[in-house]
Image: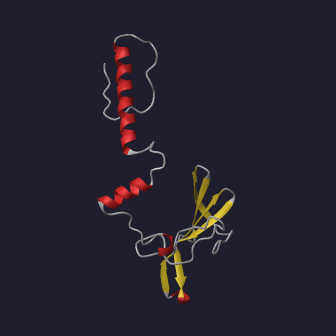
Amino acid sequence: MTGFNHEIPIFKYIRKSKATLFLIDTLPLIVAFCYHNYMIVKEKILISAGGRIVCNRCQAMSKRTKNQCGRPALKGKHVCNFHGGKSTGPRTAEGKERSRQAHIKSGLYTKESRLRESSASLTLSQLEDMMHVLNMTTAQRTRGPKPLNYKRLT
């Protein structure tokens, strides 16, 4: 909550789901927003050494105290090295496959299961179209997004 003054004029706010985002007119380097009755202030710039060093501030927030990290962010990043600024993620095909396998919890949302579900949905949609073309039903067609590679029968 450092650097926030309640008397600063607020010129614009954007409503997004449960959070309201306030952009402050006089200090464009500070963004404040309310989320679940907490006023959270994020400072974009870190000034140290009596104003001689100016750099981006790490944007990581503590879940427990709701305070912003006080370290400078790495060049070209939004967070410091403690909060994942040095991470590049997997780069090789083997590393990406290991990461994908490590994140599988139940197997319900793997590429294979999603493809299998999409093909089954495509078959059902085409059967429904055939029923309507042959006047076997008078029910409404199924609403919602159609599966991949769907072409309506007329």
Question: Which residue occupies 50% across, 78% down?
Answer: 72
Which quadrant holds residue 68? bottom right
Q: According to the image, what is the colour scheme of the structure?
A: secondary structure
Whole-percent x and y of residue 79?
48, 71
Question: Which residue occupies 40% across, 53% down?
Answer: 101
Nearest the viewer among 62 and 33 is: 62
Question: Which residue occupies 34% across, 14% down?
Answer: 133
Quadrant position of the C terminus in the picture: top left
Whole-percent x and y of residue 16?
57, 51
Nearest the viewer among 8 and 87 is: 87
Whole-percent x and y of residue 25?
57, 67
Question: Which residue occupies 68% across, 69% down?
Answer: 7
Determine the residue located farthest toward the top in the rendered image: 135
Quadrant position of the N terminus in the picture: bottom right
Count of marks overlaid on the render: 0
Answer left or right for 53 relative to 154: right
Whole-percent x and y of residue 63?
62, 64
